Amino acid sequence: MMNHGVSSAPRILIIDDNVAIHEDFKKILLKGKSSDSKLDDLESALFGERDEVFSPPEYVIDFATQGKEALAMVEQAEKEGSPYALAFVDGRMPPGWDGIETISRLWKVSPDMQMVLCTAYADYSWDEIQQNLGQTDSLVILKKPFDIAEVLQLAHALTRKWELNREIQGRLHQLAYFDSLTGLPNRTQFLDSLNKTLANAQKMEKKAALLYIDLDEFKRINDTLGHSIGDKLLKIIAQRLSTCVRNSDLLGERGENHKTARLGGDEFTVLLSNVESDEEASAVAKRISNSLNQPVELGGHQMMVVPSIGIAMFPADGEDADSLMKNADMAMYFAKRNGPQNYRFYQESMNANALKRLTIETQLRNGLEAEEFSLAYQPQFDLKTGNLSGVEALLRWKNKELGQIPPMEFIPIAEESGLIHPLGEWVMRTACTQVKTWQDQGIDLPRIGVNVSPKEFIHPEFISNVKSALADSGLDPSALQIEITETLLMEHFEGTAKTLEELHKMGVQVAIDDFGKGYSSLSRLQELAIDCLKIDRSFVSAVDESFRQKSVLNAIIAMANGMDLGMIAEGVETKEQFLFLQEKHCDEAQGYMLSRPLTLEQAEEFLQKATMQLNDQDPYSSLDQGSADLQSS
Ligand SMILES: Nc1nc2c(ncn2[C@@H]2O[C@H](COP(=O)(O)O[C@H]3[C@@H](O)[C@H](n4cnc5c(=O)[nH]c(N)nc54)O[C@@H]3COP(=O)(O)O)[C@@H](O)[C@H]2O)c(=O)[nH]1
């Protein structure tokens, strides 16, 4: 007979084929109250009122007359989430299972249950019990006839032991399956949920979506403001994430089934089960992005956290937890590369791209040591005199496995992996040393342009690297022109201004590369220590197209003149472009029509001829030289 009242009092099951014994237990354990008030009266007449000291704690007590019946009750209790703490089990219950058999079956369903085996004097030997039930501390043998105090004491001690065990298990579970900082499920728990959700989705032929979230710039916040601020920030992010997934009205009541977890560091996941379309997943991604992107105020600092989110759909993007996690992670990586505030769905091509990128990165790491890099030199000319005004150093990489790889392909990877720093340093040293060597050989080469990527330029050691490249090579700083992009100026204005000022003080020139593409603010440009604008080749090539395009180029030249900045037109490919630039008083030009980038040997030959012609006062004849672009050779 099962007691269904909802109570937090420990549950005890009495299993005995003798119903009179049930009544005895009831009287002892239920504060002396039997179901029969006449019996109670009789008992108090015989034994007097029960001493308050003996008053037992509250229990919920159920009764079974056979082992089988008890097993059904224990199974039901487990299913309902209110398991029994203790059973008093009779040793012999004909015609059914005996006490040992009953206990052994009950433990299979409820292994933590504490057992009291109630035996008559000669029922079982200790060896027999040990052989059948093993060595355990969850079993006590109680010899009949019972003593009231003994029953009360056992009930109290064993239910308390069961409660403590559960408490410890609960804490261990919390530690093993939840993240102690945010309280969210951890990776282990999440993978468990993911496996279950996918199995269910497969059975029900439903879709699911896995969102893999990483916080851009979190490492920087952690490193600069300290771990305590970093931890607080992660807690806030976890709260926002849970709230916006829970409140996702787009998913309606199904939102209940969605799970958020912290995998570690600044990586979180959201699992959307029973999703009907990709649009639902992207709606949640947008919501998360908007919510996390709200400013956070911590320790007097206001900070922005921008998430990158990768989405993999089940079953299209992976049929098991492993591949779904891997592909969502991959999509997140692509989202991050695409810029902030981004989410991306997984695509098959991502794997091929990522593999290629990884191969390039691995080969890049060995490239410097294996001396696979070289510089090409593209001449630049003074449009007034026709004299050589400088060269631009362009990095080239020929790898033993991958062959010649264009800089557009490997430089972004070098930037992301941090390899741009040793690489950039090598370019700077090689360029300075080479020009100084040429100058020492009597070659008239006034200047060398060196491309510097934003990551290099904002690095704290950039200025000292330039200084040591100049000092070690002995090159005059005015012969070095550093080329930076407009994007750098727009994204890092304050830090950039200081570095530009330092370069200016050193006497190093600075040119803005690809000028015109980046919408720089002219008033801001004026505030910066810049010497020259390199007009982007798209404006130069537009000369052949229309009058309107020509006037844009004209305006850029006029503006540079007005701001007293030097200018080099890039990508001059036709005579018409060349003549137009000359007519509009552009200072210098560079492009395939004049010369392609040259190998070291080609450059040497070219420069020697140009110097000789300069001495002969026949400047323009150098422009007829044929030269081979290294990329196409
Ligand atoms: N951070 C660094 N960036 C570097 C370095 N070396 C090169 N780069 C950057 O890589 C980009 C591609 O460079 P590259 O493939 O070398 O192309 C250069 C020229 O070959 C090309 N060019 C020159 N003349 C013409 C022309 O008439 N037509 C035409 N279609 N292309 C031409 O332009 C590239 C030089 O561009 P720019 O730097 O803008 O002057 C490029 O962005 C390089 O900056 C390095 O060491 N570090």
Image: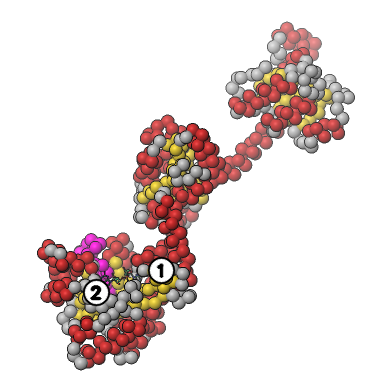
Q: Quadrant of the C terminus?
A: bottom left
Say what amino acid the circle numbered 2 marks.
Gly
> Please, what secondary structure does the residue beneath circle 1 have?
helix
Q: Where residue 454 appears, x then y in whole percent?
A: 34, 66
Q: Earlier in the sequence, mark 2 or mark 1?
A: 1
What residue lies at 48% left-to-right and 66% top-to-bottom?
362
Q: Residue at x 76, y 35 (%)?
A: 137
Query: Gap between marks 2 and 1, in whole Å?
Result: 26 Å
* Residue underneath mark 2: 591
Residue at (88% x, 24% y) in the render: 122
Q: Nearer the viewer, residue 199 or 536?
A: 199
Q: Is residue 49 left or right of residue 272?
A: right
Mark number for residue 97? none
Q: Quadrant location of residue 543?
A: bottom left
Q: Name the mark nearer the viewer: 2 or 1.
A: 2
Rendering quarter of residue 414: bottom left
The x, y position of residue 342, in whole percent, is 36, 50
Respond yes or no on whether mark 1 lies under 8 Å from ligand 1: yes
**What is the tally of numbered marks visible in this picture?**
2
Residue that lies at the very extreme toward the front in this rendered image: 633
Residue 364 location, x and y as percent? Answer: 45, 69
| Nearest to the observer: residue 97 or residue 172 | 97
Q: Residue at x 78, y 33 (%)?
A: 133
Q: Position of residue 218 (x, y in %)?
A: 43, 54
Residue 519, magenta (yes or no): yes
Color encoding of the figure:
secondary structure
Q: Is residue 215 visible?
A: no
Which residues fall within the magenta stretch? 509-528
Residue 136 is at least partly visible in this image: yes
Give the answer, above or below, for where 89 lies relative to 603.
Answer: above
**Residue marked by disc 1:** 420
Whether residue 60 is in magenta: the answer is no
